[in-house]
Image (spheres, rainbow, N blue to C red):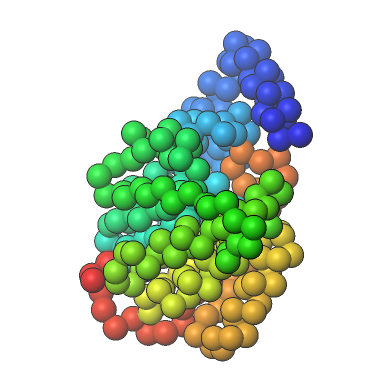
Amino acid sequence: MKSLYVRLVRLVAAPLRAIGVLGCLRRRAPRSRTATWLLSLFAIHDVDGLQELDVPWWTFDSADRAADWLREHPGARVFEWGSGASTMWLASRAGSVHSVEHHAGWASMIAPRLPDNVELRVVEPVASDAPVVGSAKPGHGGLDFADYVAAIDDVPGEFDLVVIDGRAREACLARAVDRLAPGGVIVFDNVDRRRYVDAIDSTVAAVGDRVSVTMTRGLTPALPYPTRTALLHSSLVPTRDAGVT
């Protein structure tokens, strides 16, 4: 169904480009959220298109909040599970980005587009009859993502912002909380899924008042329907300047 939708969108884009509709939207996009969203619908699975629009694949509301936070924390250290348009968006706003990707083919396409302040690492899942860390995503049964989740442990220090937008997200969240700097933020995408909401609720219950949650819902780049992205804020008072290790 997803591949059919992508083909349909690209088929529709050709005549709209020919009659100047996409050009008109492109001229308005920097100032118009609606124009940016409409253009992004034609950039689904098009990394260059989304990079040109300068949007991550989260809700617009969550991206606005994250952008405001990063402006207030220059030089922020970022860790990200799941690379893509968000990696380039983060790189232009943060001091450094450590991104881990489970799909080598996707990473090979992303890597040439990344600036020097990004470190992209590929950690593929391992076939296993009894995965230590599995993924509930259809088609990923029998794969162990334990090394992928643990990749954050190979980068020393705390992180000011952590993005969870890849595989085995529940396990990633459990790892992220303990590596978040005081006053830091976790961006957890696609929380329309019940298992992700349950993971967030369990985490908040476990850490008490250390973390507060803001749920955002609304338009999302490249998608024709609203989604939800959660922001988890560390309520601890920072004891160092953001980005200093």
Which residue is found at the position 41% from the left and 48% from the top? 122
Image location of residue 209, percent across then percent down = 54, 88
User: Among all residues in the image, which is located at the extreme right?
Assistant: 1
Residue 19 visible in the displayed image: yes
Q: From the viewer's perspective, is 91 left or right of 245?
A: right
Q: Quadrant of the C terminus?
A: bottom left
Question: What residue sits 40% from the left and 64% below the top?
Answer: 152
Q: Vertical placement of 230 versus 221: above or below? A: below
Q: Please state the horizontal and vertical placement of residue 232, each as a whole percent of the image.
A: 53, 71
Observer able to see residue 163? no
Residue depicted at x 55% and y 79%: 212
Q: Nearer the viewer, residue 19 or 125?
A: 125
Coordinates of residue 139 in the picture (x, y in percent): 69, 46
Camera-nearest residue between 130 and 97: 130
Q: Give the residue at the far top of this rendering.
A: 18
Residue 36, image quadrant: top right
Residue 201 image-quadrant placement = bottom right
Residue at the image position 68 percent from the left and 18 percent from the top: 11
Task: Give above or below for 171 relative to 238.
Answer: above
Task: Give the residue furthest to the front.
Answer: 129
